[in-house]
């Protein structure tokens, strides 16, 4: 465009050059300057100004030229821009003609610079551009992860890619990534036809490859041995756990050397084709095997999966589970054994209402067959069987009762019921939920408990009535010092109100009321201390109270194990008076006994002399000193001698007893041969034994032995025992006599097979003048056993009598082998130490 000369151009040029001089100065006539130049009258400043103007003019001219050139270039660029815009419009039209999305990134930035295109109607994708750029929001997780990984490689290394991705709706898209001129582009477009199928196969292949990689990594790092066999049952692959289990260097060593953790079953290979045709549910086999791993025996569960042409297997280490199973079985057996020994009947039913366990008490309680119970009958079947056996409570509507009973399987709380059986038994039935499902029944036979409880209540009532009707006053004080129990006799004894005592007053209050009747502080303080004392060693207390009203009471205080204290009062006023009278009578009887003893002693001595004369004269007559005697006279003389001998024996016994009672019996101890003692004693009654045709068996100890004792008195003891045995034994019977050693004791015994003694007579057998008629009807004086007892006790021995009616009698004398102690040899028993029968 041509510029018009004038002021505008000059001003523009001045503006371009940045000169601040006023534009009108350039329009001054040049004639004024020329003369100055011509005249040489210009100074340095004027020269500079002139030079500047010239330069500005030149620059102006240059600017005009440049401006014209720029105008021409600008027109060309405008034409080019229009052409490019036209081409861009055509390109965009071509891009939008096909459904797709084009994403553009600049450099390595993660922010999308531009999104072009649209896929509406062809696939499901967001309409918002920002949402479209966030791939996890509308693509499958695996596709989004794969796409983002490919984009990172594209931006970092420029690696192009062409992959298939799927939307969350399952639509397959082609993702093509390219890098050009510092830009990264991603084109997403739907596919159709053969290309779609190829991309789909590539997508599935990629997914399968990744799945295989993941599965391989998982299997290789699994903590259990896993292996794969070919059709020939040879290992072709194993994981690291398998390699470690067989202690190999690596998988190649396992495959090369065919190292087996657990050898396959012999029939596996031959059956492989047949197994391959079996249903999928039957393709897995499981077996329990044992193997040594790291030097330890381990239990393994082997799982083998039969494939078309191969076999996969893995092993689970179930050693701990096997030990737990063994321990569980032991516990189950122990618990079952324990429950089987319980008296309480127990039955455990599963969730299917079938019997899982029952102890022996359950079968015994209801009389059920153990073999039938072993068939695991249901709860309802057992109820029906019990109803048939009539061991269930009688019910008007059994069907309804049975259904209500079986509701326990759906209940939560424990149910308790009482069964009153027709046979009189009462059962307490407890049903509770089992931790592993089902119900546990406990059947407790409380028939005896109810009976005992009834008896207890009855006994308590009887005791209450008994206490209320006792003449003895009774009071029970608790550990807190309060009155817990009393009877009417206690209230009447101290004149107390029963209503007042029923309030459980404290002992201080009770004794204060009793103090009015008996003002003796010492007695009450002693009783109170014994009741309220907290000492561990509480002891019973007894005493006697004499009240001012001349009543006499014996009291007894007994500490009970539960901490209570029982206090009783007994009115002994009458018994005390009677006791005094009896004591006076006893003294009189003792005096009479002494007089009797003295009398018997004197009479015995006085009778002995004339009796000796009678025996002497009778012997003379028997010997014929007074002439021959007739047969009848000889019988009379024989009877006189026999009776005199018996009388003399009685007198001697009385004298011996009198001597013992007087404490003047002297024993002469010596060492006695036991066999000779028994032999001599047996010969003393030989004539009587032979006359009665009695057999005497003497049992002499093999070792013989000696005994320190008074020989005469022991012979007298054995004579009396044998005499009684002969007298009470029938003809043609047997009497046994013997001796034996038992440590430091010598046992002498005599046994007969006579008629024996009744228990009542045995209690008084050793008393004096207590006799029974023998076989012939003759009754002795009753002093033989009394003498035996006295002589044995003087030797510090003991006499034992064993007898039964119709079975005979045995008398055993136990004597110290070394004799009595030195002190006892001179000891004389005091009169008050003898049995009362002796004094009588």
Image: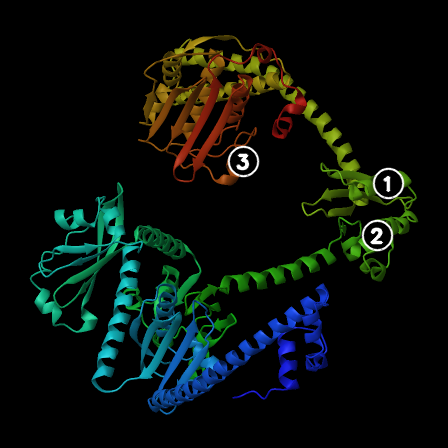
Name the image quarter holding the C terminus: top right
Task: Examine the image and state in which quarter residue 297 appears.
Answer: top left
Q: Earlier in the sequence, mark 1 or mark 3?
A: 1
Q: Nearer the viewer, mark 3 or mark 2?
A: 2
Q: Is residue 586 positioned above or below 372 on the image?
A: above
Residue sitting at x 60%, y 86%: 5
User: Can see residue 260?
Assistant: no
- In the rendering, at what x and y percent does residue 245 appear? 25, 47
How packed is label 1: few (under 14 Cα within 10 Å), some, or many (20 or more)? few
Residue at the outermost left position: 270
Rendered view: 163 above or below 553: below
Give the label, 1 or 2, closer to the camera. Answer: 2
Frontmost of labels 1 and 3 is 1
Q: Which residue is mark 2?
A: 506
Residue 52, horizontal then vertical, whole percent = 65, 70
Q: CA distance from mark 1 to mark 3?
A: 47 Å
Disc 3 packing (10 Å; few <14; some 14–19; many ≥20): few
Q: Which residue is mark 3?
A: 763
Q: Nearer the viewer, residue 103 or 507?
A: 103
- At mark 1, the secondary structure is helix
Mark 1–mark 2 CB contact (< 8 Å): no
Tell me if 821 is positioned left or right of 363 in this view. Answer: right
Q: Is residue 310 visible?
A: yes
Percent across and percent down for residue 706 are 41, 11
Which residue corresponds to mark 1?
525
Tell me: 546 left or right of 331: right
> Depth check: 365 or 88 in front?
88
> Vertical placement of 284 versus 296: above or below?
below
């Amino acid at each position: 465009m041509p510029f018009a000369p004038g002021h505008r151009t000059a001003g523009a040029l001045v503006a371009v050059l940045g000169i601040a001089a006023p534009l009108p100065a350039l329009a001054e006539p040049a004639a004024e300057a020329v003369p100055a130049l011509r005249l040489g009258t210009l100074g340095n400043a004027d020269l500079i100004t002139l030079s500047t103007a010239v330069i500005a003019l030149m620059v102006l001219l240059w600017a005009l030229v440049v401006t014209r050139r720029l105008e021409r270039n600008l027109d060309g660029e405008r034409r080019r821009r229009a052409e490019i815009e036209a081409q861009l419009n055509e390109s965009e039209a071509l891009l939008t003609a096909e459904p797709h999305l084009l994403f553009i990134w600049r450099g390595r930035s993660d922010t999308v610079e531009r999104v072009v295109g649209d896929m509406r109607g062809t696939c499901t994708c967001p309409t918002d551009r920002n949402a479209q750029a966030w791939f996890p929001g509308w693509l499958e997780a695996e596709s989004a992860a794969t796409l983002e990984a490919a984009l990172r490689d594209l931006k970092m290394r420029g690696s192009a890619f062409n992959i298939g991705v799927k939307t969350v709706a399952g639509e397959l898209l082609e993702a093509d990534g390219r890098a050009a001129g510092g830009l990264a582009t991603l084109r997403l477009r739907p596919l159709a036809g053969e290309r779609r199928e190829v991309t789909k196969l590539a997508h599935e292949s990629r997914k399968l490859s990744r799945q295989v990689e993941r599965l391989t990594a998982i299997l290789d790092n699994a903590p259990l041995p896993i292996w794969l066999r070919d059709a020939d049952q040879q290992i072709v692959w194993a994981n690291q756990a398998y390699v470690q289990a067989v202690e190999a260097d690596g998988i190649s060593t396992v495959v090369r050397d065919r190292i087996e953790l657990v050898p396959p079953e012999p029939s596996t290979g031959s059956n492989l084709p047949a197994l391959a045709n079996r249903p999928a549910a039957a393709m897995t086999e499981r077996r329990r095997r044992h193997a040594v791993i790291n030097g330890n025996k381990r239990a393994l569960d082997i799982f083998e999966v039969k494939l078309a042409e191969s076999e996969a297997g893995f092993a689970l280490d179930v050693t701990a589970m096997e030990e737990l199973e063994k321990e569980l079985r032991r516990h189950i057996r122990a618990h079952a054994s324990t429950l089987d020994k319980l008296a309480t009947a127990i039955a455990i039913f599963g969730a299917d209402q079938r019997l899982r366990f029952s102890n022996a008490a359950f079968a015994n309680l209801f009389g059920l067959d153990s073999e039938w119970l072993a068939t695991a009958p249901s709860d309802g079947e057992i109820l029906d069987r019990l109803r048939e056996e009539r061991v269930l409570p009688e019910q008007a509507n059994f069907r309804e009762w049975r259904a209500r009973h079986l509701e326990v399987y759906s209940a939560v709380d424990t149910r308790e019921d009482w069964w009153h059986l027709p046979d009189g038994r009462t059962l307490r039935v407890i049903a509770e939920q089992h931790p592993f499902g089902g119900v546990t029944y406990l059947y407790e036979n409380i028939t005896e408990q109810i009976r005992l409880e009834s008896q207890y209540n009855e006994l308590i009532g009887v005791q209450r009535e008994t206490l209320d009707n006792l003449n003895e006053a009774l009071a029970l004080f608790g550990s807190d010092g309060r009155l817990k129990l009393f009877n009417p006799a206690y209230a009447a004894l101290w004149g107390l109100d029963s209503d007042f005592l029923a309030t459980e007053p404290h002992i201080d209050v009770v004794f204060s009321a009793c103090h009015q009747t008996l003002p003796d502080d010492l007695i009450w303080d002693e009783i109170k201390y014994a009741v309220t004392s907290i000492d561990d060693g509480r002891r019973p207390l007894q005493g006697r109270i004499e009240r001012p009203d001349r009543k006499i009471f014996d009291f007894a205080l007994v500490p009970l194990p539960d901490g209570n204290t029982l206090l009783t009062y007994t009115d002994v006023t009458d018994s005390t008076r009677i006791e005094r009278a009896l004591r006076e009578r006893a003294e009189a009887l003792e005096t009479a006994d002494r007089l009797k003893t003295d009398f018997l002693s004197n009479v015995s001595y006085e009778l002995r002399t004339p009796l000796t004369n009678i025996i002497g004269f009778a012997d003379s007559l028997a010997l014929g000193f007074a002439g021959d005697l007739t047969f009848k006279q000889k019988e009379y003389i024989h009877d006189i001698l026999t009776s005199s001998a018996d009388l003399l024996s009685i007198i001697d016994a009385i004298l011996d007893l009198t001597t013992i009672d007087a404490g003047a019996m002297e024993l002469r101890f010596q060492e006695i041969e036991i066999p000779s003692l028994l032999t001599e004693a047996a010969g003393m009654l030989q004539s009587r034994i032979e006359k009665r045709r009695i057999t005497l068996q003497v049992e002499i100890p093999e070792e013989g032995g000696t005994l320190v004792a008074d020989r005469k008195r022991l012979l007298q003891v054995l004579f009396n025992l044998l005499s009684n045995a002969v007298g009470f034994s029938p003809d043609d019977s047997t009497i046994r006599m013997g001796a034996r050693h038992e440590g430091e004791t010598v046992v002498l015994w005599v046994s007969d097979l006579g008629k024996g003694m009744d228990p009542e007579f045995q209690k008084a057998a050793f008393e004096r003048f207590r006799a029974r008629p023998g076989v012939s009807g003759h009754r002795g004086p009753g002093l033989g056993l009394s003498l035996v007892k006295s002589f044995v006790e003087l030797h510090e021995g003991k006499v034992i009598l064993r007898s039964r009616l119709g079975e005979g009698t045995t008398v055993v004398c136990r004597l110290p082998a070394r004799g009595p102690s030195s002190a006892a040899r001179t000891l004389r028993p005091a009169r008050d130490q003898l049995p009362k029968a002796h004094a009588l």
